[in-house]
Image (cartoon, rainbow, N blue to C red):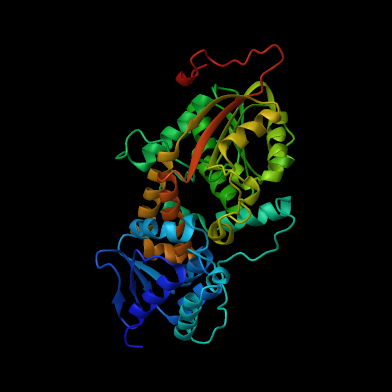
Amino acid sequence: MADAALRLKSLVEQLVGVPLPVRIRAWDGSQAGPPDAPALVVRNRRAVRRLLWKPGELGLARAWVAGDLEIEGDLYQALDLLAELVWERGEGARTLLQALRDPKVRAAARGLVKIAGLPLPPAPPREEVRRARTHLHTKRTDRRAISHHYDVGNDFYEIVLGPSMVYSCAYWPAPDATLEQAQHDKLDLVCRKLGLTAGQRLLDVGCGWGSLALHAAREYGVRVVGITLSQEQAAYARKRAADEGLTDLVEIRVQDYRDVADGPYDAISSIGMAEHVGGDRYLEYAEDLYRLLRPGGRLLNHQIGRRPQRDESSYNVDEFIDAYVFPDGELAPVGTTVTQLERAGFEVRDVEALREHYGLTLRRWVANLEADWARAVRLAGAGRARVWRLYMAASALSFERNRIGVNQVLAVRTPEGGASGMPLRARTWGG
């Protein structure tokens, strides 16, 4: 084929019904499309087969993870240009089944099949999680899902997250601040919202690599129990506590939140963990945390939220994220989260939206990964590194474009009589 790019561009545009916003560069060196736009590099015919067998987001993701597709130029610009075509219109502009009702589109599909070669479905990359969609959010399936995401390797996460080792939205004093400063400010914000004082007990649910637990113990004199389902995270957090001489204040457990039975705690933090709970389990999660708090104790629930839909019954999870990044993860609108916390008995006292802060955070993580790309590939493998680069860059755009958000919900187990213990001017975060 002398000009594969032009042929691909023409056939894909017939198939999806709109002009392609990016250039195409094909395996034969040919190019077609807007000269100033980023290029979608189609490295081989297998990439075309992947898209034919799974049109839309998952097919593109499989081709990207396998290295069959590349982006040449600005990754963020390319994803932004492709967003409407792939993500916002759902499975490309049309599914093949819908498209094939049109004779012109049937001809385009036949042309793509001819270009792709033998129409056999390529095996998904080994990084893809394949499992039954039943029995979600049992203790066993949650442990397996957490291991898939967090046991990639502590050295790999050190590259991405930097010295802070905080894997949640930072709190930026200014866009040009350092990531370390912004993460320090986030940890301190959580501690101040919880009103921590020396001698109190804090339960950190989903403690990660121990950054919040160490900060609370070091700066506030709090006794902290941090729980995680990741063996690698727990080992790393324990070593950090030992290195800082904080083992008398910090205990790290490999434990499911449903198995914690040594309350009451004065405060509970759940930072970037509730996305793993699942909608069907969320009330149980909220009730468990309520049970573990003393009367007057505070909960800080920091959680990604999606935009609500008119018909919530039609909501589908993100195929790429579910298959490659956060298996079984679920996002809910912030209103749903607040309602479930209230149903469990909490009094919700404050909701702070940090959407723009997460876009800034993700862009710094992507920059960290790209700056040490060769080492990241050696540590995690090319496919896994490509998964993380794509998901973090695409997520940054999703936060910036208000497709998803992130919220800190401060709630209190208000005792009978109504004395919440909150200051009159709560946003000072004293008391």
At 37% from the left and 75% from the top, the residue drawn is 10
Position of 198 with respect to 264 (left or right) is left
Which one is in front, 123 or 294? 123
Position of 90 with respect to 365 (left or right) is right
Above or below, 82 relative to 106: above
Above or below, 203 relative to 325: above
Position of 62 with respect to 184 (left or right) is right
**Quarter of the image holding residue 417?**
top right
Q: Position of residue 328 (x, y in %)?
A: 63, 54
Please count the marks in the image.
0
At 25% from the left and 68% from the top, the residue drawn is 35
Which one is in front, 56 or 276? 56
Which one is in front, 369 or 393? 393
Is residue 155 something one can see in this rendering?
A: no
Is residue 316 something one can see in this rendering?
A: yes
Which one is in front, 426 or 114? 114
**Quarter of the image holding residue 2?**
bottom left
Above or below, 381 relative to 179: below
At 28% from the left and 67% from the top, the residue drawn is 34
Q: Position of residue 370 (x, y in %)?
A: 36, 59
Position of 8 with respect to 334 (left or right) is left
At 59% from the left and 54% from the top, the residue drawn is 317
Image quadrant holding the N terminus, namely bottom left
Q: Position of residue 77 (x, y in %)?
A: 33, 57
